[in-house]
Amino acid sequence: MNTTKFILAMIAAAAAVLAIAHWLNVDYFFFAAYTILQFIVLATAWNILGGYCGYVNFGSAAFFALGAYSSVALIKFDGAIDSWFPEGVASFLHHIFPLPIPVLIVIGSVVSGVVGFGMGYLTLRLRGAFFAIATLAMAVVLQTLVVNWDFVGGSRGAYIIRPDTLEVGSWQISYIEYLFVLMLILTMIALVTARTIERSQLGFGFATIRDDELAAEACGVPTLRLKLIATTLSGAFMGMAGAPFPYYIGYLQPASAFGLEYAVNSIAMPMIGGTTSWVGPLVGAILLGSAQQYATVTISSAVNLLIVGLMLVGFVIIAPNGLIGLVQERSRRRQS
Amino acid sequence: MDIPFDLLINAIVAGLLLGGFYAAVTAGVSISFGMLDIVNIAHPAFIILGSYIAYFININFGIDPIIVSLIMLPVFFTLGTLVYHVYYLSFERRGQESLRGLAFFFGLLFVTEVVLILVFGVDYRYVEARYIGPSLHFGMIDLPLRMLVPCLVALALFAAIELFITRTFTGRAIMAVSQDQLALQLMAADPIRIKRIAFGISIATAAVAGALLIIIQPVEPSVGREYIGRVFAICVLGGLGSMPGTLIAAVMLGVVESLTATFYGPSWAPAVAFGFLLLTLAFRPAGLLGR
Amino acid sequence: MTTLLHVNNISKRFGGFVALDDIDLEVEPGERLGLIGPNGSGKSTLVNCICGTLQNESGSVVFDGHAMDGLAAHERTHRGLARSFQLPRPFYSMTLADNLRIPLLYTVHARMGPLRSAGDLDARCHELLDLFGLAKKAKQMPRDLTQVEMRKLELARAMAAEPKLLIADESMAGLSHSEIDDILTLLARLNERGITIILIEHIMRAVMSFSQRLAVLVSGKKIADGKPEEIVHDPEVVRAYLGQ
């Protein structure tokens, strides 16, 4: 299926999901589905660097949180315009601010993308293990910086007021539905990008880095450049997913934005689903995300994290290529 | 800035004591990462596990935490060999150490933390012992015993490991396996068994490190995460597998952290280790004394 | 005729261990140079320094009139320097044809611009696999290959980058008599097409029959460099490497 057909198929599927959701009109559905869609984006983003290139990023939460906090900073800036600027400038700025969420998304992804590039530049010359540790280090450093930045609330957190509805002309939808639609679009962007990369020369190059970086260099593959592309893209997508988060959650705290659940989930979902294809993170995110939603509601959130951790360890030992890998194994065996 | 001299001196002394402790904490990773090339980022989780076991037995039976940890040494050693066995069968043998191995240990780290939260909750826990509280005084220098005793025990542990590595057959075999597995096989030693013993020792040190940790500071499950950065920062800065290097790096880190916490506030302390790590990785990955 | 490869005073240490000590080497275009020496003498380290996998501490490498210092390995490959690895390093997740497609895409295209369509690429992959006798296994995975076939794939992949100089690092270790002849014939054919070859080997009969010139490396130093018949009788070479 070529890319155009795929995009159309995606849009059709998304439209169907949206239609059903709109008809159901249950707020909880939008909240839960938003979380799962967010995980699809995070898992897909992680997989570009982790699954395709073989470089493990433990700092996914940091990129996600950067996207969220750049939104918070801009929202807070809007509140501070009148006290910081003289009247003329202030009234001009009020035409631009508060920025609509799509703009926040773009800014969030740019910020995270730039940080991803910077981090990559500093650490990608190292072996994979060192890179992984460096990502963890970077996440903690960023978290410490945010905790000490009072403008965005520091450790006390920031309250973001979510409007009740979005009005476009004469047409009105609930704000949470609006957020859901945005995340649906972001999910499609992420999936289409991942699939396109996978089938392109770039994806081919990524695979050589994963298989044998030294041999790849000897074949003429500019490994550093490709790795930087991967870290930048991966970071940008994670920031993209984080940008609308403050509106979704209402109260943002560094401990939760930088929480380890994001790191674990963004690794567990692709590894359980399968890392070699764009389908893996999608499958992993839907399965694991739904399971977690269910567990949080019925048991407790700590237990649901335990389940994720155990599943990660279990799958990594038993089914290294994830669910997709198991399916592929079975079809290969049937063929021969 | 007008720095009060006694504050400075005490910050440095506290840093030295802390550094000694950090050296013991890192000794285990120096073995698993420096010599066996296993990126066990779950090591801090084992340390915290050691802390909680020390806490539990101390609170319920009144036994001194350091004694508890010595009793727990064989238990942790066995745990280490088991973990290595799983690691070896699942990853090393298949040649897929990098991505999967990291994910495995990360999962272990996470699961351990969550289990501790479920069992003990997120409140800070601390132990009770006669040397927690009193301090020695030398002029303007204060030596809190709750830091001095762990530091001394840590240095003893560190010296014991160094002697073991350099003086015993098994110890030298461990050094050999990191350099040339084939040569070791020709010496009629089974490299896998040697690695298993080495990893077991690595985890056994976590038992002691955990007990020392909970003497120095109250512990809650997520404390382990701060130590990931510290431990790997020290390992890398000291040069992988170099015990003397580890000691020097540990003391350096301890002093810098202590100074930062004293003069800039404790909320900046976690960033110090991780910042060190990033800088070292970016500019001098071979470490101070490394190759 | 300008020298194709000029290695000037290369030195490389690993901590306290001196792997290469002031190595000087020149290779003319079209030449067949043999590089021999005991295990651990630094042959692979030298190759790694020439190709950019390792950075030498001092000295320089000049290839085809261009200084190679500071250039990454992939850039040197782009300039026409290719090598095969002593222990074969295929891309395990790809078919044989795809293994060859990588250097075609990333080196040949980079050098000449995408002149070729997908069909041309496929044809070129098959041509190369055919040259090395691997055409039938084009769609198979590297793990299904025999030792010889893996070595051939290594060489084929190095060739796919259309190099001016090919360094074959111990491609024949552990192979049978006829398998060695196979590879030698292949290399000779490549040389006839104008490709300069540096052959690193322990198998003396292969090195002797193939090389126009021989260089000997012992403990990081070059102790001899000249015609094969003379080198083989050089007393120092005999003492250090050939034995008795």
Image: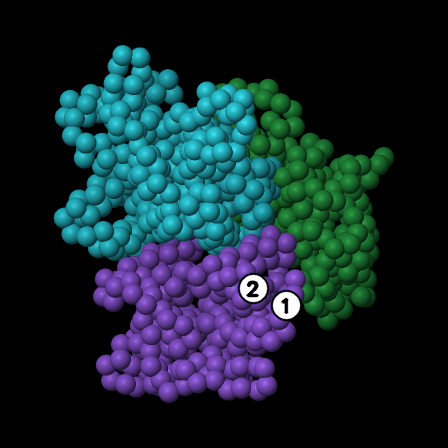
User: In front here: C176 or A173?
Assistant: A173
Q: Colour of chain B?
A: purple
Please say if A201 is above or below B168.
above
Q: Kindly identify which numbered label has been placed on residue B3.
A: 1
- Spot occupied by residue A159 in the image (x, y as percentages of width and height): 35, 40
User: Farthest residue in the front direction?
Assistant: A87
Q: Is residue C217 left or right of residue B59?
A: right
Quarter residue C32 falls in: top right
- Spot occupied by residue C71 in the image (x, y as percentages of width and height): 70, 42
Quarter residue C30 falls in: top right
Q: Earlier in the sequence, mark 1 or mark 2?
A: 1
Tell me, what colour scheme is on the image? by chain
User: In front here: B270 or B21?
Assistant: B270
| Image point (62%, 71%), residue name | B4
Q: Is residue C139 left or right of residue C158?
A: left
- Spot occupied by residue A292 in the image (x, y as percentages of width and height): 22, 46
Dot 1: chain letter: B
Q: Is residue B64 left or right of residue B278?
A: left
Dot 2: chain letter: B
Please say if A37 is above or below B155.
above
Mark 1 vs mark 2, CA separation in Å: 9 Å
- Mark 2 belongs to which amino acid? Phe
Q: Which chain is drawn using green?
A: C
Q: Colour of chain A?
A: cyan
Q: Pointer 2: what residue?
A: B263
User: In front here: A158 or C174?
Assistant: A158
Mark 2 burial class by Cα count in 10 Å: few <14, some 14-19, many 20+: few
- Mark 1 belongs to which amino acid? Ile
